[in-house]
Image (cartoon, rainbow, N blue to C red):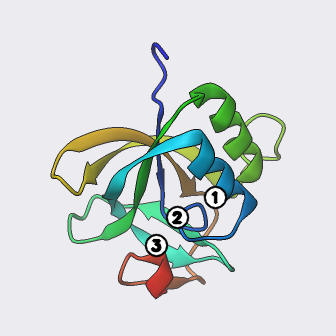
Amino acid sequence: MTGICDRLFVYGTLMRGFDHPMAKLLSKSADFLGEAKCKGRLYRVNHYPGLVLSDDPAEIVFGEVYRLRAGEELLREFDMYEACGEGFAEPTEYVRKMLTVALDDGTASEAWTYVYNWPFAQLTRIASGRFLEG
């Protein structure tokens, strides 16, 4: 996959342990690289979370990184699931962005993730940065 990042950082219902069709698609179509974290704040949107990016190193969101085996096709599937990209009314609830994540072994990696794109002032923050603790 030249020129396309094949890594995806997930922090909510796509993580291991969730009995969701898209989580199952991810687990069978990608290689789990490990737990990871990024700078940001996590909010409870509904039965799922939203990541808002931050420059504050004290604000951390925890998740997992996967290497997508068929990157472009899978990213299109996840774009549809997250209702973002071409064909969806703007502003979409999520936008796919590239960010730097820190893997558990201390290495940094570029990865795609879905960033929450709607107003979040009324949402409840998940202070731990871990969706399962929210």
Q: Residues within 10 Å of mark 1 (few under 14, many from 20)?
A: some
Between disc 1 and disc 3, the foreground one is 1
Instruction: Depth check: give the residue in front, 102 or 99.
Output: 102
Instruction: Identify the disc placed on residue 16.
Output: 2
Q: Are marks 2 and 1 in contact (CB under 8 Å)?
A: yes
- Please tell me which of labels 2 and 1 falls first in the chain: 2
Q: Which amino acid does label 1 sit on?
A: Ala
Q: In this view, does 2 lie to the left or right of 25?
A: left
Q: Earlier in the sequence, mark 1 or mark 3?
A: 1
Q: Which mark is residue 80?
A: none
Question: Which residue in the structure is indicated by mark 3?
Answer: 42
Which residue corresponds to mark 1?
Answer: 23
**Residue 8's x, y, as percent?**
48, 44
Q: Residues within 10 Å of mark 3 (few under 14, many from 20)?
A: many
Q: Distance between the residues labelled 3 and 2?
A: 18 Å
Task: Name which residue type carries label 3.
Answer: Leu
Please state the horizontal and vertical placement of residue 110, each as a whole percent of the image: 34, 37
Q: Identify which residue, 99 or 64, lies in the foreground.
A: 64
Which residue occupies 45% across, 28% down?
5
Crowdedness near tag 2: few (<14), some (14–19) or many (≥20) residues, C-alpha within 10 Å? some
SS assignment at label 3:
strand
